[in-house]
Image: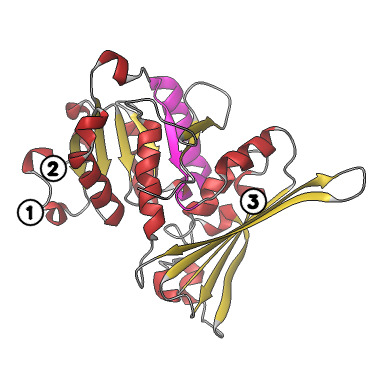
Amino acid sequence: FQDMALDGVPRRVGVVGYGRLGQSLVSHLLTQGPELGLELVFVWNRDPGRMAGSVPPALQLQNLAALGERHPDLVVEVAHPKIIQESGAKILRYSNLLVGSPSALADQATEQQLREASHRWHHAVFVARGALWGTEDITRLDAAGGLQSLRVTMATHPDGFRLEGRLAAVPSTGPRTVLYEGPVRGLCPLAPRNSNTMAAAALAAPSLGFDHVVGVLVADLSLTDMHVVEVELSGPPGPSGRSFAVHTHRENPAEPGAVTGSATVTAFWRSLLGAAPAAPLPRPWLCNPQSPGPGWVWVCGSDMVSS
C-alpha cells in the first residue's frame, strides 16, 4: 500500500458481514473513517434484511460477486469461515483481503487457493489477530527458531459456543469440561466460530502451523460474562537443560452467549487500520509478514484494547 496520507486519496473499504463485528466496523468507518482517509464503499450480509434501517441503501451490496464494481482497496471479512472458503480467492481479484475468520485457512485447499490468487492478482491477505495476545512476540520467537511448542486454550460458558459435528453432541460432564484438545487443524471445522484465536496463533507461528499448535476448548459454567484465553509457549532447552517459557491469561468481558468478547471488537478496528493505514500509526499497530513471497499472510492489529 502507498500511504494515502501522502497522496490524499481515501482508501476504499468494503465490509463483508453485518453481525456484531460488522456493525461495529461500519459504525467506525462512517464516523471516524473520513478523518482517517478511509471511505466505506459497501456492506454485504448473507441476510440483506439485517442492514435495513442502519446501512445507507447506497452502501448495501446485494450480490457479493459484484463487489468489483465498488472498486475497493480492502475488503474486510467478518462473517463466517465459509465466506473465505467460497469467495476469498474471488475477492482477491479486486482487492486486498483482511480475514476475520482465519479458521477457514485450516482447510488446506482454501489456503492454497488464497495463496495462488494473492500471487496472481498481486493483492495481499491479512489476518486479524482477534483475541490473540502477544502476536508479535510469538512471530519473532518463531522466526528466530526459538519456538518449540504453542498451546492456546479458550474457555467460556457453553452458551458462547457454536459447535458442529461431533463436538455439538459432547455433553458437559461438570462445571468445567474440556471439549477438545489437539491440533488446531482438527478443531477449526468443528468450532469454526470459536477457533479463530487458535488459527491466528497457527498463522503467527508457521514453523508449527495448524498441525502442531495445540488448541484447547473448554466449557466453563462459571464464565457467564467473559472469555478466557490462555497462551502457553516454550522454546527448546538451553545449555542448562531449562527452556524459555511464557504463559499469558487474558480475560475478555463478553455478553452472555456472545461469540465475540468486547475487547476483541476493538482489536478488529485496529486490525483494519493496520491493514489499510491512512496515516502514520504508533507502535504497536503492526502488520508482520508471516511467509515468504509478496502479499501473503500477515497478522494485523494491536495488543492495545483501548479505543
Q: Label 1: which residue? A: 53
- Chain-order first, disc 2 or disc 3: 2
| Foreground label between 1 and 2 | 1
Q: Label 2: which residue? A: 60
Give the SS element for disc 1.
loop
Foreground of the two, 172 or 238: 238
Question: Can I make out residue 162 in this image?
Answer: yes
Q: Residue 213 got which mark?
A: 3
- Chain-order first, disc 1 or disc 2: 1
Task: Identify which amino acid the numbered label 3 is placed on.
Answer: Val
Segment colored magenta: 103-131
Foreground of the two, 217 or 254: 254
Q: Residue at x 30, y 52 (%)?
A: 21
Residue 117 is inside the magenta segment: yes
Give the SS element for disc 3.
loop
- Chain-order first, disc 3 or disc 1: 1
Give the SS element for disc 2.
loop
Whether residue 38 is situated above or below residue 244 in the rendered picture: above
Task: Identify which amino acid the numbered label 2 is placed on.
Answer: Gln
